[in-house]
Image (tube, rainbow, N blue to C red):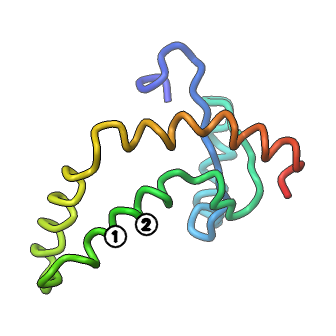
Amino acid sequence: MPIVHSDGLGQFQQDNATPHASRVATKWLQEHSSDFRHFHRPPKSPEMDIIEDIRDALLHVVEKRSPPPRTPMDLLTALQDSWYEFAPGYLQTPGESMPRRFASLLHARGG
């Protein structure tokens, strides 16, 4: 965290997805909790996860390809090609929506 956010303003977001809430991950977070601020959010909150939106859009584009990818290398190529086909500002919109998403989540008290 100090490397990425040398200003000390970075926060770790724990979405409590099953792999992230494992015993090993939980122990690591407890041992390193003084190293960063930790933003707790409700378990498995997809409305807060812009990565899910981006992944879904990317997979949708890949699924429409003809012929479909048949090997892991074909899939990698299709993903990379599809990624570069997104409009230049595509990733900016989900990022800019985060303050609104956080406000809605806090207003709903996580519900």
* Residue 51 in the figure: left or right of residue 17: left
Q: Is residue 43 above or below residue 30?
A: below
Q: Where, by quadrant of the figure, is residue 34 drawn?
A: top right
Residue matched to label 1: 59
Q: In the image shown, does 105 or 72 lie closer to the viewer? A: 105
Q: In the image shown, does 1 or 108 lie closer to the viewer? A: 108
* Residue 27 in the figure: left or right of residue 61: right
Residue 94: horizontal and vertical position, in percent? 51, 43
- Which residue is at 12% across, 84% downward? 67
Few, some or many residues within 10 Å of mark 1 (<14, 14–19, 20+):
some
What amino acid is at disc 2?
Answer: Asp
Q: How many marks?
A: 2
- Which residue is at 48% across, 39% downward? 93
Q: Where, by quadrant of the figure, is residue 46 drawn?
A: bottom right
- Which residue is at 61% across, 38% downward? 98
Residue 86: horizontal and vertical position, in percent? 27, 50
Few, some or many residues within 10 Å of mark 2 (<14, 14–19, 20+):
few
Disc 2 is placed on an element classified as helix
Q: Quadrant location of the C terminus?
A: bottom right
Residue matched to label 2: 56
Q: Are marks 2 and 1 in contact (CB under 8 Å)?
A: yes
What amino acid is at disc 1?
Answer: Leu
Residue 35: horizontal and vertical position, in percent? 60, 29
- Which residue is at 42% across, 56% downward? 54
Residue that extends furthest to the top in the rendered view of this protein:
7
Q: CA distance from mark 2 to mark 1?
A: 5 Å
